[in-house]
C-alpha cells in the first residue's frame, strides 16, 4: 500500500512539474521576438521549427491538464476514477504518444536552431566584414532570439522527461482491484 501511495504522489508531482515546464516553454516562445530593420518583428511564428515546438508544448499542456484531475483523485482516494480496461489503458498509451510527440519537438527544436544559428552567424560575419551598418547589432539580436528559443526547447525537454518517466512508472506498480467511480471495479 505504501508503494502505491508513493507512486501515486510521484505521478501527481511529475504531472504538475511537466505542466509547469511545458507552460514555461509556451510563454518563452510567445514572448520571444526581435525587431529586424525598422519595422519587421520576428517571432516564433516565423521559424517553422519553433512553431512545431509550440504545438508540441501546447498539446502536452492540454494532455497534462486533462490528466491532473485524475491523478489528484487517485492520490486522495487511493483508487482510479476510471476502470483501466474501459478506456483501453488510456494513461499508458497516451503517455507514450505524448512523450514521443515531445521528443520529436525537442529534437527538431535543437537541431534546426543550431543549424540556423551557424548559418546566420556566418552570414552576418560576412556582412560585418563588408561593413554593412547594423549587422553587428542584428547578429546580437538574432543570437539572443535563438538562445531564448533554445531555452524554450530545453523546458520542453524537461516536460518530455517527466512524461517519459510517467509512461514507465505505472508499469512498476503492483496491481490490485478496487472499486472505481466510473466503469465498475478498477485496478491501480
Image (cartoon, grey):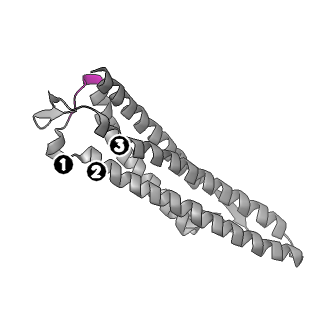
Q: Which of the 4 quarters of the picture holds residue 163?
A: top left
Q: Is residue 123 above or below residue 186?
A: below
Q: Quadrant of the C terminus?
A: top left
Q: Please tell me whether mark 1 or mark 3 is closer to you in this view.
A: 3
For the residues bearing labels 2 and 3, Cβ distance under 8 angstroms: no
Callout 2 crowding tier (Cα within 10 Å): few <14, some 14–19, many ≥20 = few
Q: Which residue is mark 1?
A: 88
| Residue placed most toward the observer, 38 or 103 | 103
Whether residue 73 is in magenta: the answer is: no
* Nearer the observer, 113 or 40: 113
Instruction: Evaluate if marks 2 and 1 touch, with contact meaning CB atoms under 8 Å apart.
Output: yes
Q: Position of residue 30 (x, y in %)?
A: 56, 54
Residue 150 in picture, x, y percent from top left: 62, 55
Residue that numbered label 2 is attached to: 93
Q: Which residue is mark 3?
A: 168
The residue sitting at 55% across, 47% down in the picture is 155
In front: 48, or 74? Answer: 74
Residue drawn at (46%, 56%) of the image: 103
- Earlier residue among tags 2 and 3: 2
Q: Earlier in the sequence, mark 1 or mark 3?
A: 1
Give the answer, above or below, for where 11 lies relative to 133: above
Asked whether the viewer can see residue 38, the reply is: no
Q: Secondary structure at mark 2?
A: helix
Label 2 vs label 3, nearer the camera: 3
Q: Circle 1 sits in a helix, a strand or a loop, which is it?
A: loop
Residue extent of the magenta highlight: 76-81
What separation in Å lies between label 2 and label 1 (alpha carbons)? 8 Å
Amino acid at each position: 500500500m505504501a508503494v502505491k501511495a508513493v507512486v501515486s504522489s510521484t505521478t501527481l508531482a511529475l504531472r504538475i512539474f511537466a505542466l509547469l515546464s511545458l507552460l514555461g516553454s509556451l510563454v518563452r516562445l510567445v514572448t520571444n521576438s526581435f525587431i529586424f530593420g525598422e519595422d519587421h518583428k520576428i517571432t516564433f511564428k516565423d521559424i517553422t521549427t519553433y512553431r512545431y515546438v509550440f504545438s508540441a508544448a501546447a498539446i502536452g499542456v492540454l494532455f497534462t491538464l486533462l490528466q491532473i484531475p485524475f491523478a489528484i483523485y487517485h492520490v486522495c482516494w487511493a483508487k482510479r476514477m476510471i476502470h483501466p480496461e474501459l478506456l483501453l489503458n488510456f494513461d499508458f498509451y497516451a503517455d507514450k504518444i505524448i512523450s514521443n510527440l515531445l521528443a520529436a519537438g525537442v529534437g527538431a527544436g535543437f537541431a534546426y536552431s543550431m543549424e540556423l544559428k551557424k548559418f546566420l552567424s556566418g552570414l552576418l560575419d560576412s556582412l560585418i566584414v563588408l561593413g554593412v551598418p547594423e549587422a553587428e547589432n542584428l547578429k546580437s539580436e538574432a543570437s539572443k532570439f535563438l538562445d531564448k528559443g533554445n531555452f524554450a526547447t530545453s523546458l520542453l525537454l524537461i516536460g518530455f522527461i517527466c512524461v517519459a518517466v510517467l509512461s514507465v512508472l505505472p508499469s512498476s506498480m503492483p496491481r490490485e482491484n478496487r472499486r472505481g467511480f466510473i466503469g465498475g471495479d478498477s485496478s491501480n
